[in-house]
Amino acid sequence: MTASVLVTGFEPFGKHEVNPSQLIAEELDGIVLPVSYGRAAREMRRALDERDPEIVIAFGLADEREAITPERFAHNLDEADTTDNDDVAGSGMEIEAAGPLAYRSTLPVDEIVAALRSRDLPASVSRDAGGYLCNHTFYVLMHTLKPGRMGGFVHVPPLQVLPRERLAEAARVIVETCVQHRSGS
């Protein structure tokens, strides 16, 4: 039996007319989250409730990166400098007042990187998802995810670094790696 997987991505933001994480979500029948502090967390929680997935892989764009980077940690802190698509800045405060300082990804981060590299896809591990909406959404995901479920966040580079076809291949490799890891294969 195959594990149920939810893939998320984000809509375009800032100077990006196309967000590669949105393309991934659309390719894999996932959901596209708004680039909004006020709405993204709500949409993530709703998707988790409606789909009740065993595995959740959230994707986001990191325009300065040259590789696919699974994130190890989500921190309980929003930055205060960058505004979202609703023209709202992060709070600079904790995401969940009573939440832990950080959550660790439960995705097989090292295995994902190894699987991507075995297909000649650029990949490396990243410590955390930064302070913008990627971290915010990652933290909300891990705070909301049911016990025993697998979840985490993966940053992808812009399409100029990794074309759409290779990006789709990478996303499928990530999903396959997570499903195999979950089933113990």
Image (tube, rainbow, N blue to C red):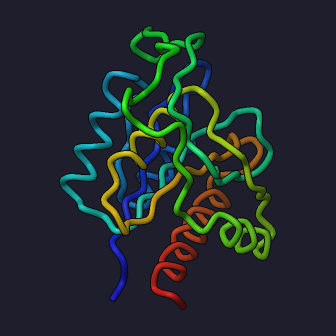
Q: Of residues 40 and 142, which is closer to you in this image?
A: 142
Question: With 130 as the anchor, is 140 left or right in this view?
Answer: left
Residue at 80 percent across and 45 percent down: it is 66
Residue placed farthest to the left in the image? 50
Write down the quadrant of residue 109 in the picture. Answer: bottom right
Vertical order, 182 against 143 (above or below):
below
Residue at 28 percent across and 38 percent down: it is 43
Q: Of residues 182 and 23, which is closer to you in this image?
A: 182
Question: With 163 as the anchor, is 36 left or right in this view?
Answer: left
Vertical order, 2 against 121 (above or below):
below
Write down the quadrant of residue 88 in the picture. Answer: top left
Q: x, y percentage for residue 184?
A: 51, 88
Residue at 66 percent across and 68 percent down: it is 112
Question: With 64 as the anchor, is 171 left or right in this view?
Answer: left
Q: Quadrant of the N terminus?
A: bottom left
Q: x, y percentage for residue 86?
A: 39, 13
Write down the quadrant of residue 149 in the picture. Answer: bottom left
Residue at 61 percent across and 38 percent down: it is 61
Q: Quadrant of the C terminus?
A: bottom right
